[in-house]
Image (cartoon, helix red, strand yellow):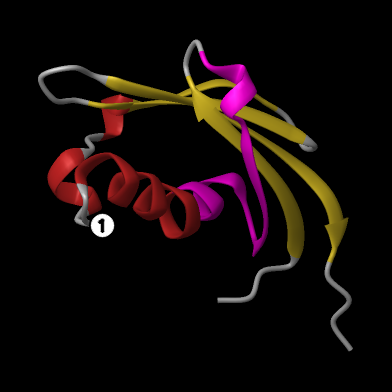
Amino acid sequence: MDGNFIYNVEYHKKGKPNGKRSLEVLADDYEEVLWTHLLKQLCEKVHGDDFLFGYLKNEDVVCNNTNNIIAQYTVTFRDEIDTIYIIDMEVIGERNID
């Protein structure tokens, strides 16, 4: 899927900021970045498969801060020991559509 904006996405496990990972995503909004691109990838890391909706509920994805340029979310994968990720997103450009 191609979106209209370029997002820089950085994420790490809570309490482990030195383990930060990043990627660039084309999307139309923060929700598309999360639910279409990033959460399936994180779900596969945590649970070994990308069956996202079997593991995450809407209340497990919390928006901490958002505006037109940046957003921060906390995502909790519930299990015997919860795995919590902090996700920072920033709009870094607009895709040229000719």
Residue 48: give x, y in percent of width and height. Answer: 21, 51
Instruction: Tell me if 66 is positioned left or right of 50 in this view.
Output: right
For residue 65, which quarter of the picture?
top right
Q: Which sits in the foreground, 71 or 81?
A: 81
71 over 42 or under it: above or below = above
Residue 85: give x, y in percent of width and height. Answer: 44, 26
Amino acid type at mark 1: Asp
Secondary structure found at label 1: loop
Instruction: Tell me if 11 is positioned left or right of 14 in this view.
Output: right
State which quarter of the image contains the C terminus.
Answer: bottom right
Instruction: Tell me if 36 is positioned left or right of 70 in this view.
Output: left
7 over 60 or under it: above or below = below
Highlighted range, magenta: 16-34
Residue at point 80% right, 37% down?
69
Residue at point 73% right, 30% down?
67
Instruction: Tell me if 55 is positioned left or right of 84 in this view.
Output: left
Determine which residue is flagged by label 1: 50
